[in-house]
Amino acid sequence: MSYENIIAEVKEQVSYITINRPKQLNALNKQTIQELSSAFKEADENDDVRAIIVTGSGEKAFVAGADIKEFADFDITQGKELAAAGQEKLFNLVENLSTPTIAAVNGFALGGGLELAMSCHIRVASDNAKLGLPEVSLGVIPGYGGTQRLAQLVGKGKAMEMVMTAGMITAEEALQWGLVNHVTFTSELLSKAEEIAKAIKRNSPVAIGKAIEAINAGYIDGVNGYNVEIEQFGLAFGTEDFKEGTTAFMEKRKAQFPGR
Ligand code: CAA
């Protein structure tokens, strides 16, 4: 599929999705959210893709937030619709993909930008990255899951501080707080994300999808994560990947997972 605001390509079993509105610091307007949603779905449905790396184009920003110019004159109903549609189409979708997603945060990750990074399974940041949820400085609050995912990742106290001050933290602080998994020099950002993708590619994609489901289950109200783990653990025994993984171990060779 061809896109206007993003670039999507697959190389060596990795899908690269680049948000490409550098003049607007890759701000997420409606069309970009729709295109991202389609690209993530397309990558997840492609059996050849074993990991997805999402980044921003240009040297300044991953994503500087939802497009403020687009919602500046919205009313209450339109505001609710914006958050609900975005969460459903993109942010919840990304979090629940069975293909591992890695955010390569190459600069500002603000508002909807940090929310997109937080929806991904893993985050790597360049040392010039600045992260924050500045929505209250605009008289609004994070609407793409930020109030929930930030508290899950850094704890309630730090989430309260970040949201209430609308401040930005550095990549190093984000690392200390557990908001990102790794910090690299800017020039090494993509190769760090690729190194993680490479390690992931050696393992069973079916088992990884089940593990993502089990981990996420612990964060859903009313769902018992331990029970989901038991269920997914059991189901893994019925897969070709399990047969291949255990056989390869006993035959002292590297597993070649069929992904079924
Ligand atoms: N929406 C729309 N346009 C944006 C944008 C955004 N979130 N962020 C930056 N831009 C645009 C600017 O308007 C500017 O465009 P023009 O040249 O046409 O004026 C261009 O990108 C470059 O930005 P700046 O000139 O402001 O660059 P800077 O280096 O001086 O500042 C910045 C960089 C600190 C990131 C600043 O751009 C900024 O504060 N951006 C807004 C950040 C923000 O508030 N994000 C939260 C959005 S609300 C949200 O995300 C809601 C939600 O949860 C659903």
Image (cartoon, helix red, strand yellow):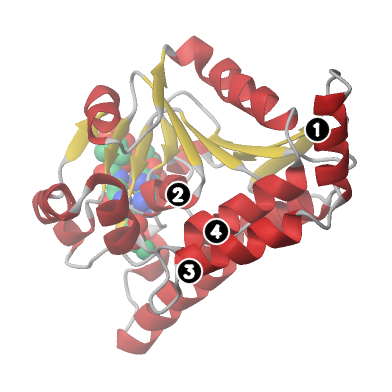
The answer to whether the residue bearing label 3 lies less than 8 angstroms from the nearest atom of ligand 1 is: no
Query: Residue 71, located in which quarter of the rendered image?
Result: bottom left
Q: Which residue is mark 1?
A: 13
In the rendering, which numbered label is found on residue 87?
Answer: 3
Between marks 3 and 1, how big is the CA–CA gap?
Answer: 27 Å
Separation of marks 1 and 2 at Cα, in angstroms = 28 Å
Work out whether mark 1 precedes mark 2 in sequence or the reverse, and give the earlier one. 1
Camera-near label (4 vs 3) is 4
Residue 233's spot in the image, x, y percent? 65, 56
Distance from disc 3 to disc 2, alpha carbons, whole Å, reads 16 Å
- Asked whether mark 2 lies closer than 8 Å to ligand 1, one says yes
Left/right placement of residue 33 relative to residue 49 reads left
Quick one: label 1 or label 4, which is nearer the N terminus? 1
Residue 172, image x, y percentages: 26, 22
Residue type at mark 2: give it.
Ala
Nearer the observer: mark 4 or 2; the answer is 4
- The residue under label 4 is 214
Q: Which residue is mark 2?
A: 27
**Nearer the viewer's eye, disc 1 or disc 2?**
1
